[in-house]
Each structure stands twice: as C-alpha cells, then as structure tokens.
C-alpha cells in the first residue's frame, strides 16, 4: 500500500510533474491493450531519468509497495496491468537513441524508444532492426524485451531474444546488471536470456543494445490460394521441407480471406478455403532462386491460384489483406477473442480441423489468421459481449484451444506473453515442480516479490481469470495500429 | 522415464541423500576446461543417448544429451539439415549435453547465431532431484522464464540436462571456401564491407597473412559473391571443421592458449611483427585465439570484452556475483553438481 510516507519519499526525489495521483490523470493507464481487466494504479510515476527509476525502485523496496513497469502499453496479455495499491512506473519518456554503431551494426537505446524508430535511425546506414511486432509504430523496445515480442519475420530473423545483445537492468535491490554487450558471447550465466521475456518480474531494463542487419536488397511476396485448409497447412511444411526459410509465411482461412476482401478489396481469391502469403528476401540471386522453389511447392500442393509480387507496391497490396484482418474481424461480430498458441507445423491442419469442430460445438464463429511458418496461431473467436452466455462460452472455447495446443506438443503463448490473461493455463503447461523452479528464479532477482506481482507465473493455488484481446463493437484497442 | 534417465535420476537422489557431489561428464572432450573440485566422483552421462523425435519438416530434433555430436550431424545431414551453431568436437569427440554446458560455437556463429539461440527446450534434473521440462519443440514460445537458454554455457552447475530440442537449418545448397593473401588491415576492410550488406559470407579466419573466407547459401548467390575474389585460392572446406575442432597447426603446440572476445566491428592488429603467428582471428575478427609463451594473461592494445584461459594454462576465475551465487542456489542448494565451478 502507498502510505503518506512513501508518497512523501517519491515527492522528495522526483519532480512533481512525474508523479500522478489524481484519478483523471491515472485513468489512461488503467490497462494495456488487454482491456478486459482494468485497474486504477495507486500512483503513476513517469520516469524521466534512470535515477528516477532507481529512486522508485528503492522507495518501493523500502516501503514494500508493488511495482509494475510499463512502456507504451500495447501488450496483449495484461502484463502491464497496474496494481491498485502499487506504483505504475512508466518508461515511455526514457526514449533516447543513445548510439547507432554502423561499424558494429548495433544500436543502443533507452527502453521507451519505439520499435520502429530504431529501424528508422538505422536506415541511413542501410541497416534495420528485424523483430517487427504488428504494433511496431507504437510499442516500446523495453516492452518488447519484457515480453520477448515476435512478429511476422521470426522464422528467419528470430524473436526479440535473438536480436537483443546487451542490457542494463536495475534490480529491486538497486544493483545494476550489465548483461551481454557488443561481443558475440559473454562470461557467466546467461542472465540476458532470463530477463528477456520475464514480463517485468526480475528487474527494470534501463538500456538495450540490439543488433542491426543489412536491409535485404530484394523482397518478393507470393500468394497461394488453396481449396482445402489442411492442404494449405501441409504446403507450409512442404516449403520448409524444400530447404527454404522465408522472411514471412502467413496463412488465412476462408472466413479471414472473405472478411479481409470485403474490408479492403485487395484481390484475394474469394472462393479459396485458405490463402498463404510467403515473403522472400535477400540478394537478387537468392530471391530469384527461392521464389521459383516456393512457387513449385505451391503447385505441387495444388494451389488454385499463385500470384507473385515483385515491386514494393504489389508486395504492399498483398500484405494489406493480412494487415487488415483484425479490424476486418471486428466487422464480422461485435467482439472477438484473440488467442496466441503455438503448435508444431505438422499439426496445423489437424488443429484447424479441431478448432472448426469446437466452433460448431460452442456455436461461435472463429476466424484464423496466423504466422504459419512459426506454427503460431491467432484464432479469433467471434462473439457478443453483451450476451453473458456467449461471453462465458467464448472464454471456455479459448481455454480449450490453448489446452489443445499443449496436447499436440505446443505452447499457450507464442508471442503475446502470459501476463494475467493466460496465467491459469500455465498450470496446464507446467508441473508444480517446474512452477516452483520459476518462483525460485524470481526470488534470485526479487526477494521482495513486489515486481509485477500476480503476472506470468501463477501461485500454485492460482486458477481463475480467462480472456484474450477484447474487441467491442469493432473497436480494437489502439485502432490505429495494424494487427497481424 | 527410460532406464538411463532413471539411473541418472537415482544417482542425483543418492548424491542428495548422502550429501555428496558429482562431476558430470559426457565424452570428456572438454575436461581441460573444468576448473572445479576434481575429488568429486564422476557421473558419466554419455550412455543417455539417442534421438527421441525428429521431424525434418519441423526443423527440430529432440535428442538425449549423451548423443554424440558426430552422430547428430550425420542424422540431420541425411535429411539435408544442420545444427548451425556447429559446436566444436575436440579430438573428434563431444556430446550434445557437453556442447550445451560449454555453450561453445563453431566458425559460423556471427551468421547462424549461438548455441543458446537454437536451444528450444530442455529436460533436466535439478539439485532438488526434480525432473523438469522447460521450453518446447516450437520456435515461438514465451510461456515462463527461459530456463533452457539459461542452461547454455552454465557448465553443468545447474543440473543434468537429460534431453534437448534443437532448432535446425537447411544445409546450404552450395559452399565455397577460399584463401586470400593479405595484410591484417586489408582483411579488416574486406570484412567491414561484408557486414554491411546481405551476402552469403558464413565464415572468416585470419592467420599469418592469409584471410580465409567461407561463402554458403543458394548456389547462384554464392557464385555471385565469389566474383569479387578472382585471384584467390579455393581451399578444402574441411578447413572450417579443423578450425572448429582446434586440429589445425596453430593449435597443435602446448603453448598457453587464451580465448579473447572483442566488440563487433573491431579488428585486432598485431603490433609486434614477430608475434604474427601468435594470434588467429575468427568471427569477423571478434574472436581471437592468442598464444603466450609465458602463461601470462595477454596484454592487448585494445580493450577486450573477455579474456579466458583455454588450454595449457589456468587462471583464477573471477569472483561470482551475488546473483550468480543465488541462481546456483536456486537450482542446486546442496552444491552437488560440478562443485567448485563458479560462473
């Protein structure tokens, strides 16, 4: 709880403008993009310097106050949901790009820097930062680190973990950990791997060094239309089996294709049961060769339509349908739940069939748009939140999908994180001994257990809240962002 | 649980009950790197081997940790794939578990990523005698703390790895390797050009006036890159394997050998010409193998990221941080695994 004493401490060490205590000032921070569960934070601290972060940590530790760290608040699993009796530490003002080193091909930035700004700053050197979550124009790199964010290009370029090479982290005990750096390996335990994806429970990241890659010279997009969802799923395995690692490999089912087409008229084959979008990038010689290979595989799997885009404008048009899929889903039903399970690729066909069967059983529509190359599903369950029965049914439907993902050797979350959203499914994916080991790791860095309490790692007793990205009457949280 | 898993599980529980420590050993190919207490009895884990699941179209293989690296290589190569971090096989030996414990990678590290990057999941026995699984068999997985990757390079101090799921890559369609005579400064500028463009470069080594380069990938793209090197000599691609395994002549003597890492984008220039055979640089010039006659820690004109004694010399390890001690305690409070090893 935030006592008068604690508040006085904050005021003595931080400027008054950095501390928000009035209800109307705090309301914009009551949730991240997982808007189902809102909570007004006890107090909001808008840190302007690393010293402000340090002071906040010390005061929270000394006064035993829960501390939730937040960046841009675009997270989809409630990882930055505030604590009613805690401090919400907002890092979006720590947004300086400290260095772009074209020699080392690295950038060092503060955590509030938005993902896209890194690539924009690197562009003049012919470089870019590869991970591109769909919210990249708004999401902050600190949040990306906390959630180990993914995106469309993970299959070839990896997740956030594979692209972050150095971190500075402040623990609740105010120790500064300098992890990794510009070399290819570091001594000691790989704490960097532990901090990335730890959902703000182990420390506050104050500086991030990422690797930059040369911008590919050429980019092609191939669209394949299929008469059968399962065959399209098998074609994904076929492409990988042919030795090609595409830059992106996305799949949309019949409903998603129809919704996207009605929304944006991009020229997708409307009667197809599934559409694959395959992006190939690299040098001219490389892309020419891989494009031929992928087109050949699509033919072998009886693609009814194959369309190749070679100039940036055409590529953008083919991608547009995929990018508008989420807002388009918002026109199919008043609300939808977005799930995030990952499965082995060879299970795509069977899992889609199982989801279709569940859809009939629960009498709720479902639309599938997902990162097929990674086996990362995003089923959108369509329902009406004003109908209590539908709301409950949608939650059960979502839970069953996640449980099914675990049963075929997959995981409950591929890129959105556990947060508060999937905390009870953690109990299905991990044994009690495994959960206990997670708690021991948490204690290594946060003995106080005040860092983002109630998130990501369930207490053994925990099993409650369910949910997903909640969309009411087509109003996607952050509607200006494309979601894919 | 297989018979071999049960044996290891029992061994850990016996050690716990008797308050005894064990030294985990696989093939023993990297025993020279062990700096812990040598009086603890050995627990051999190399029998715990074999493929658990391999689906080539998934680009993932799950193997028991005692599986030899050479066998793994043959199995995945028969399906046109590779474990791209390419860990060393000193004296032709080495197991998957040993590779994970050491975290060492081959010459392709800057382009293919680290061993840790390719580790998707593990099954381990911790120091509480619990059998645990973390991560999985899929590429994208953010549920729970990433314990699998913490184990990479942890030198067997946190538990016994029973099995691991590894991300594979397709074998390149074509590989060509060349040697170019040039100075250290010329080498640095050749490599600087390549780090800034998409290319098929996947290996560099500079030693004694010669720059060795490896290009691999789609055949047409490799040929395209090779056009820049008309006056070079084609070499046997085995060179990279020998370099990885330290079986080239540079590594043949008993002189103290140090492993030094430098910042990306930097290049070490030997200032003393008499010393030009004392260093060899891999990984775009950022991994330096350095020999010193007098076993003294090398003193370089530039600031390295790390300097580790590797062969024929042992220097005192750094004091572990409070967090290192705590993480060890979180996995192995009775200190039964590889006692005396500190990270």
Image: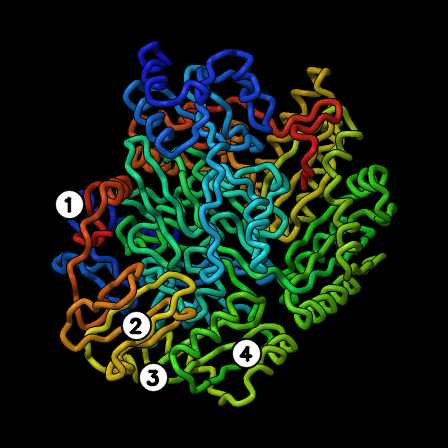
Residue name at image x 25 percent, y 58 percent: B24
| CA separation in Å, label 4 and label 1 | 53 Å
Which residue carries the number 2 mark? B289
Q: Are marks 3 and 2 in contact (CB under 8 Å)?
A: no
Q: Is residue A358 left or right of residue B266?
A: right
Q: Nearer the viewer, residue A348 or B236?
A: B236
Task: Tell me the CA gap for discs 3 and 1.
Answer: 54 Å
Q: Mark 4 near mark 1, Cβ–Cβ under 8 Å?
A: no
Q: CA distance from mark 3 to mark 4?
A: 24 Å
Circle 1 marks a residue in which chain? B
- Residue A207: % across, % down: 41, 42
Give x and y (percent) for residue A389. 70, 17
User: On the picture, is B179 further left or further right than B10?
Assistant: right
Which residue corresponds to mark 1? B18
The residue pinned by badge 4 equals B175
| Residue B184 as seen in the image, left or right of residue A387 | left
User: Circle 1 sits in a helix, a strand or a loop, which is it?
Assistant: loop
């Amino acid at each position: 709880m935030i006592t008068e004493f604690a508040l006085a401490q904050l005021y003595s060490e931080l400027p008054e403008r950095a501390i928000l205590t009035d209800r109307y000032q705090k309301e914009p921070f009551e949730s991240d993009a997982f808007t189902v569960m809102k909570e007004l934070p006890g107090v909001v601290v808008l840190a302007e310097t690393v010293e402000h972060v340090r002071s906040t940590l010390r005061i929270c530790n000394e006064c035993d106050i829960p501390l939730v760290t937040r960046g841009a608040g675009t997270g989809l699993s409630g990882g930055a949901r505030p604590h009613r009796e805690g401090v919400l530490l907002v890092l979006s003002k720590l947004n300086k790009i400290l260095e772009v080193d074209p020699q080392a091909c690295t950038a060092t930035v503060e955590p509030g820097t938005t993902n896209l700004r890194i690539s924009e700053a690197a562009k003049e050197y012919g470089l870019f930062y590869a991970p591109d979550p769909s919210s990249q124009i708004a999401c902050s790199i600190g949040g990306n680190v906390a959630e180990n964010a993914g995106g469309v290009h993970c299959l070839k370029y990896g997740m956030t973990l594979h692209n972050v090479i150095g971190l500075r982290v402040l623990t609740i005990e105010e120790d500064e950990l300098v992890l990794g750096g510009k070399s290819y390996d570091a001594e000691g335990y790989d704490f960097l791997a532990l901090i990335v994806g730890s959902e703000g429970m182990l420390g506050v990241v104050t500086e991030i060094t990422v690797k930059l890659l040369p911008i590919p010279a050429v980019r092609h997009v191939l669209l394949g239309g299929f008469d059968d969802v399962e065959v399209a799923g098998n074609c994904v395995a076929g492409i990988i089996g042919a030795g090609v690692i595409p830059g992106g490999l996305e799949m949309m089912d019949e409903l998603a294709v129809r919704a996207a087409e009605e929304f944006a008229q991009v020229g997708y084959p409307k009667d197809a049961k599934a559409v694959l979008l395959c992006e190939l990038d690299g040098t001219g010689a490389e892309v020419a060769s891989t494009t031929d290979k992928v087109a050949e595989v699509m033919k072998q799997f009886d693609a009814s339509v194959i369309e190749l885009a070679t100039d940036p404008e055409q590529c953008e048009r083919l991608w547009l349908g995929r990018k508008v899929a989420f807002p388009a889903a918002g026109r199919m039903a008043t609300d939808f739940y977005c799930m995030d399970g990952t499965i082995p690729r060879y299970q795509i066909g069977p899992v889609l069939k199982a989801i279709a069967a569940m859809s009939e059983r629960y009498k709720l529509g479902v639309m599938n748009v997902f990162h097929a190359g990674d086996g990362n599903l995003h089923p959108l369950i369509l329902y009406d939140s004003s109908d209590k029965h539908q709301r409950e049914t949608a939650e059960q439907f979502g839970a069953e999908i996640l449980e099914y993902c675990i049963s075929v050797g997959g995981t409950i979350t591929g890129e959105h994180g556990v947060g508060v959203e999937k905390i009870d499914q953690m109990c299905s994916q991990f044994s009690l001994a495994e959960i206990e080991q997670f708690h021991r790791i948490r204690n290594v860095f946060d003995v106080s257990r005040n860092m983002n309490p109630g998130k990501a790692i369930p207490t053994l007793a925990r099993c409650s809240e369910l949910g997903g990205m909640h969309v009411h009457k087509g109003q996607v949280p952050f509607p200006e962002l494309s979601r894919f | 649980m297989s018979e071999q898993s049960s044996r290891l599980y029992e061994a850990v529980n016996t050690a716990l009950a008797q308050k005894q420590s064990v030294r985990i050993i696989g093939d023993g190919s990297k025993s020279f790197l062990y700096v812990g207490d040598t009086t603890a009895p050995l627990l051999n884990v190399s029998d715990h081997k074999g493929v658990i699941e391999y689906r080539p179209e998934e680009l993932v293989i799950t193997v028991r940790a005692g599986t030899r690296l050479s066998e793994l290589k043959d199995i995945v190569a028969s399906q046109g794939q590779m474990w791209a971090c390419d860990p060393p096989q000193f004296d032709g030996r080495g197991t998957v578990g040993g590779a994970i414990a050491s975290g060492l990678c081959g010459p392709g590290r800057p382009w293919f990523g680290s061993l840790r990057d390719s580790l998707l999941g593990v099954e381990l026995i911790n120091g509480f005698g619990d059998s645990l699984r973390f991560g999985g068999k899929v590429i994208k997985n953010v549920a729970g703390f990433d314990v699998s990757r913490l184990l990479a390079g942890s030198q067997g101090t946190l538990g016994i790895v029973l099995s691991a799921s590894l991300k594979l890559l397709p074998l390149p369609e074509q590989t060509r390797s060349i040697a170019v005579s040039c100075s250290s400064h010329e080498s640095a500028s050749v490599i600087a050009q390549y780090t800034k463009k998409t290319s098929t470069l996947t290996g560099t080594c500079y030693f004694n006036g010669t720059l060795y380069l490896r290009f691999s990938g789609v055949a047409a793209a490799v040929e395209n890159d090779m056009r820049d090197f008309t006056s070079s000599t084609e070499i046997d691609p085995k060179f990279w394997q020998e370099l990885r395994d330290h079986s080239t002549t540079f590594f043949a003597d008993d002189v103290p050998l140090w492993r030094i890492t430098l910042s990306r984008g930097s290049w070490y220039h030997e200032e003393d010409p008499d010393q030009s055979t004392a260093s060899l640089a891999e990984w775009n010039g950022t991994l330096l193998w350095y020999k010193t006659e007098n076993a003294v820690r090398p003193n370089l004109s530039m600031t390295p990221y790390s300097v580790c004694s590797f062969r024929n010399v042992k220097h005192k390890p750094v004091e572990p941080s409070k967090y290192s001690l705590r993480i060890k305690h979180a996995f192995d409070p009775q200190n039964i695994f590889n006692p005396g090893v500190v990270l």
